[in-house]
Image (cartoon, rainbow, N blue to C red):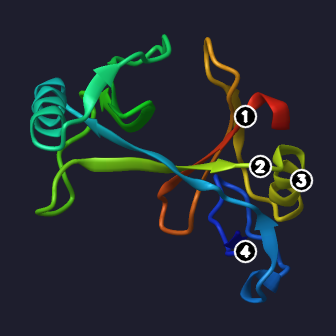
């Protein structure tokens, strides 16, 4: 379970309801689904080699998104997503490239969509090509991307 928190918005004023300070169960998160890293093409290649050679991840199937990149798998799960993005100017610190978002495997799609609307949190709903996944994408107060993954049976 995840305890409710106040998430940032995409050009929408935060809700006047400050109940985010009071613990509320808003969704049963099941696991962190993946991490997504955006970087220049050459750095993406280095990252791919690193995660394969050092951590033993393996490149595998990736949906036909408009962007170019790689999905690296741990057993049967694509846990590191690398995306080529020439607009990334490099890291903001000494630790490395830009972390684009964190994704959580979740249940309760309809309830969570309603909660986001009630709290005036702008989000985008997408369907992953050639899969049965539905995603809700929004940002937290620090501007970090949050992506919630819902299986088809929950849509």
The Cα–Cα distance between marks 1 and 3, rounded to whole angstroms, is 14 Å
Seen at 14% across and 26% down, the residue is 45
Tell me which numbered mark, 4 or 1, is placed earlier along the sequence. Answer: 4
Tell me which numbered mark, 2 or 1, is placed earlier along the sequence. Answer: 2
SS class of the residue under badge 4? Answer: loop
Drawn side of residue 67 relative to residue 95, left or right: right
The Cα–Cα distance between marks 4 and 1, rounded to whole angstroms, is 21 Å
Most foreground residue, 142 or 73: 73
Q: Are the residues flagged by discs 2 and 4 in contact, CB closer than 8 Å?
A: no
Seen at 25% across and 35% down, the residue is 57
SS class of the residue under badge 2? Answer: loop
Q: Are the residues flagged by discs 2 and 3 in contact, CB closer than 8 Å?
A: no
**What label does residue 151 carry, if any?**
1
Query: In the picture, residue 155 is in which quadrant?
Result: top right
Observer able to see residue 155: no
Q: Are the residues flagged by discs 4 and 1 in contact, CB closer than 8 Å?
A: no
Q: What is the x, y in percent for residue 86?
A: 24, 27
* Disc 4: which residue: 4
SS class of the residue under badge 3? Answer: helix
The Cα–Cα distance between marks 2 and 1, rounded to whole angstroms, is 8 Å
The Cα–Cα distance between marks 4 and 3, rounded to whole angstroms, is 13 Å
Q: Nearer the viewer, mark 1 or mark 3?
A: 1
* Image position of 108 with respect to 118: above or below: above
Looking at the image, how many numbered discs can be counted on the residues? 4
* Disc 2: which residue: 107
Q: Are the residues flagged by discs 2 and 1 in contact, CB closer than 8 Å?
A: yes
Q: What is the x, y in percent for residue 72?
A: 32, 30
């Amino acid at each position: 379970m995840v305890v409710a928190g106040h998430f940032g918005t995409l050009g929408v004023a935060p809700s006047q309801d400050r109940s985010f300070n009071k613990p509320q169960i808003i969704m049963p998160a099941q696991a962190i689904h993946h991490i997504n890293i955006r970087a220049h093409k050459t750095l993406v290649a280095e990252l791919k080699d690193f995660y394969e050679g050092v951590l033993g991840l393996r490149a595998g199937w990736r949906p036909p998104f408009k962007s170019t990149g790689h999905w690296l798998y741990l057993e049967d799960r694509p846990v590191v997503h690398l995306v080529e993005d020439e607009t990334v100017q490099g890291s903001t610190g000494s630790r490395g490239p830009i972390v684009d978002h964190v994704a959580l495997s979740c249940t309760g799609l309809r309830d969570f969509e309603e909660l986001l609307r009630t709290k005036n949190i702008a989000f985008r709903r997408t369907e992953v090509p050639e899969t049965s996944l539905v995603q809700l994408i929004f940002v937290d107060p620090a501007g970090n991307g949050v992506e919630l993954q819902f299986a088809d049976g929950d849509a």
